[in-house]
Image (cartoon, rainbow, N blue to C red):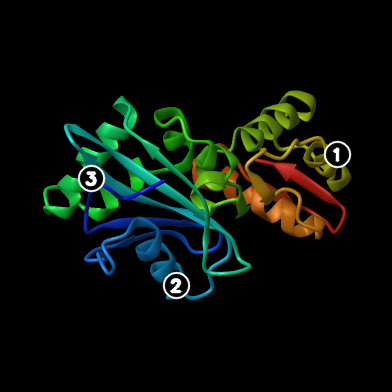
Amino acid sequence: MTDENIELSDIAILFDRDLGVLIFQNCRGYNSLMDDAEWLVERTPQKSRGFIIRPIHKKKSSGLWIGEYNHRDNQVHRQEMLFDSGASTLYKMIKNYAAHKISEKKVIKKLRLEDLRKTLKSKIINDFKYYVCPPDRFYYSCIEAEKIFDTLVKKYGKNKKIHYSEISKEIENVKPCKDIIVCLLKVPNLLERIHNLNHAFKIRKIGEIKFTSPDNIEIV
């Protein structure tokens, strides 16, 4: 894949398994997709595994370059160029951000991994996995948390004492998402699992888990 006849933007967006989403401006160091990306990865602390998105323009088409890196070295091992309608739409949004027409907060919200998978036909993005489930995703939108709540209320009702092992069973039945390595409901410590689940309940204002004794809980 060559940079010939491709116009590069000065902005790059890095999706790192550990660091999350980082936006870099004025990154036209070598005016080369691969060299610029590897220079950026080399200077990013605590890098693990992820990909970089960079807006590109070729002739009359606008789109995105996507390069994948891993934790072993500072090299991009896989790359793609996309010029379909989804890539063109994201290109315009990122360029509007670079021109200070929209905020960084709005851009990051639009660049959620789930939305990128719906918008772009990218094998790199489809193959990407988070190391730990992002807190915003788990606490606000994990469907498994609400399933557990509904199941417990249906089985036992609210404000009734049940042994905490009952909630443990429901957590054990959860199937982790395919793009997550560490699910917050599958951490080794059972009390931490219950704490994470309870925090999701409270944030969504659907209920709460209360320990009434060392062995019993109530759903309130």
Q: For mark 2, does the 10 Å Cα neighbourhood hold few (<14), some (14 to 19), or many (20 or more) residues?
A: some
Name which residue lies at 77% across and 53% down: 212
Residue holding disc 3: 5
Is residue 171 found left or right of 208 in the rendered image? right
Q: For mark 3, does the 10 Å Cα neighbourhood hold few (<14), some (14 to 19), or many (20 or more) residues?
A: few
Q: Is residue 37 above or below residue 166?
A: below
Name which residue lies at 12% across and 54% down: 100
Q: What residue type is labelled 1?
A: Lys
Name the mark on residue 44: 2
Label 1 vs label 2, nearer the camera: 2
Name which residue lies at 50% across and 42% down: 140
Q: For mark 1, does the 10 Å Cα neighbourhood hold few (<14), some (14 to 19), or many (20 or more) residues?
A: few
Q: In this view, does 137 lie above or below 214?
A: above
Q: Which amino acid does label 2 sit on?
A: Thr
Residue holding disc 1: 169
Is residue 62 found left or right of 216 in the rendered image? left
Does dot 3 land on a helix, a strand or a loop? loop
State the separation of the CA atoms marked 1 and 2. 41 Å
Q: Are marks 1 and 2 in contact (CB under 8 Å)?
A: no
Residue 143: tell me if it is visible.
Answer: yes
Residue 161: image location, x then y, percent: 81, 41
* Quadrant location of the C terminus in the rendered image: top right
Residue 142: image location, x then y, percent: 58, 38
Q: In this view, does 93 lie above or below 50?
A: above
Label 2 vs label 3, nearer the camera: 3
Residue 99: image location, x then y, percent: 11, 52
Does dot 2 land on a helix, a strand or a loop? loop
Residue 98: image location, x then y, percent: 17, 54
